[in-house]
């Protein structure tokens, strides 16, 4: 039995589906079980509720660990590791982030490093996945695109090795079902470095509509994030991270998807084609 946390989110929902397609026994953990599609075994679980985590790992051999982004990642990861120790769980596959522990990635390292370290020290088998920027982050442009408004570029010409969530999920599933990836740390990127305007140009070609990009300012971004309910600390993290990308800090490509899966990673264009409807 494999426990899938983050099961209602971008990556976890694909992991859950892929495991089911492979005939593996999987249990989705969700704060609101009603949000998990019908047909899956579900357990109510909240990283903030230790008793719920102990119940969620009962009878489980492997855990897909994904905490939602933010300063709480460390406490959420540690709570799950704590609940798993001394049970039948023998493996944890954790979604971390590119550059964890490296200079320039202090914000996301602060989120993910404690969990990575606890997993390594746990005595359990593990695989750490450190994805670059998700292709699905482009979904945040959908409201502007649908409204015919220009898209704000906060990244200048800085590039990312944009990776498709289905590739992250595919590596996770293979790591959950086989021992082939035990003890591996994979930095998962797509096949090409793309700036935000380059991504938008590819998306425009896919949806067959011209899309305009204009430079965004930090002040605008701050105001937008605060309006969405983010706190000052989170806004500070985001601004620092965006500056790092603008300076070219995240212009990193690896061959780790291919190393793990024996096939190249999917392109942003392919992701856009698969998700075209979300922008129309
Ligand atoms: N986006 C990127 O470019 C990027 C790049 C590198 C690394 N990452 C890492 O990837 C992760 C995000 O992945 P994602 O986009 O697939 O996630 P996501 O779509 O944001 O989903 C987050 C999941 O966490 C669940 N969740 C939130 N709070 C919870 C709680 N207290 N207890 C239990 N579950 C809770 C949510 O479920 P409910 O709300 O339904 O309960 C949801 O299923 C983060 O750790 C982030 O640092 C992201």
Image (spheres, rainbow, N blue to C red):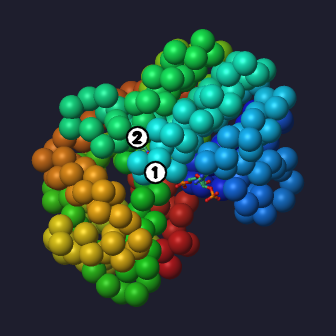
Q: Residue at x 53, y 72 (%)?
A: 278
Q: Is mark 2 within 8 Å of ligand 1?
A: yes
Quick check: marks 1 and 2 in contact, CB under 8 Å?
Answer: yes
What residue is shown with label 2?
111
> At 63% from the left edge and 16% from the top edge, which residue is drawn?
124
Label 2 SS:
helix
Which residue appears farthest toward the top when viewing the image?
A: 123
**Residue found at x 50% / y 61%:** 273
Q: Nearer the viewer, residue 183 or 177?
A: 183
Q: Is residue 278 above or below residue 191?
A: below
Tell me the residue that label 1 is attached to.
69
Q: Dot 1: within a 10 Å radius of its alpha carbon, few (fewer than 14), some, or many (20 or more) residues?
A: few
- Residue that extends furthest to the left in the rendered view of this protein: 247
In x, y percent, where is residue 156?
16, 59
| Front residue of 53 and 244 | 53
Disc 2 packing (10 Å; few <14; some 14–19; many ≥20): many
Task: Work out how far the residue at label 1 is from the one at label 2, CA to CA, in angstroms.
Answer: 8 Å
Q: Quadrant of the N terminus?
A: top right
The image quadrant that residue 176 belongs to is: top right
Q: Which mark is residue 272?
A: none
Can the viewer see residue 26?
no
Q: Is mark 1 within 8 Å of ligand 1?
A: yes
Nearer the observer, 217 or 197: 217
* Residue 91 to residue 246: above or below: above
């Amino acid at each position: 039995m494999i426990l899938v946390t983050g099961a209602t989110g971008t990556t976890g929902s694909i992991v859950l589906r892929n495991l089911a397609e492979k005939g593996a026994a999987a249990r989705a953990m969700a704060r609101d079980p009603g949000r998990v599609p019908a047909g899956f075994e579900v357990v109510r679980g909240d990283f903030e509720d230790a008793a719920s985590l102990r119940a969620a790992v009962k009878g489980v051999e492997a855990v897909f660990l994904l905490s939602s982004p933010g300063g709480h990642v460390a406490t959420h990861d540690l709570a799950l590791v704590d609940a798993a120790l001394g049970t039948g769980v023998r493996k944890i596959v954790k979604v971390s982030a590119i550059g964890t522990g490296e200079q320039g990635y202090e914000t996301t390292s602060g989120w993910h490093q404690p969990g990575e370290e606890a997993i390594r020290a746990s005595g359990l088998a593990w695989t750490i996945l450190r994805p670059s920027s998700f292709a699905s982050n482009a979904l945040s442009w959908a409201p502007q695109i649908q409204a015919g408004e220009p898209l704000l570029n906060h990244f200048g010409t800085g590039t990312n090795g944009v990776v498709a969530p289905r590739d992250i999920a595919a590596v996770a599933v293979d790591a959950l079902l086989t021992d082939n990836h035990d003890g591996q740390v994979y930095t998962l990127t797509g096949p090409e470095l793309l700036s935000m305007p380059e991504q938008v140009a590819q998306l425009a070609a896919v949806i067959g509509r011209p899309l305009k990009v204009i430079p965004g300012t930090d002040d605008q971004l701050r105001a937008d994030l605060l309006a969405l309910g983010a706190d000052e600390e989170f806004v500070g993290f985001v601004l620092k991270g965006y500056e790092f990308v603008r300076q070219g800090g995240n212009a990193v490509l690896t061959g780790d998807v291919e190393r793990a899966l024996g096939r190249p990673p999917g392109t942003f264009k392919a992701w856009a084609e698969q998700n075209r409807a979300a922008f129309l």
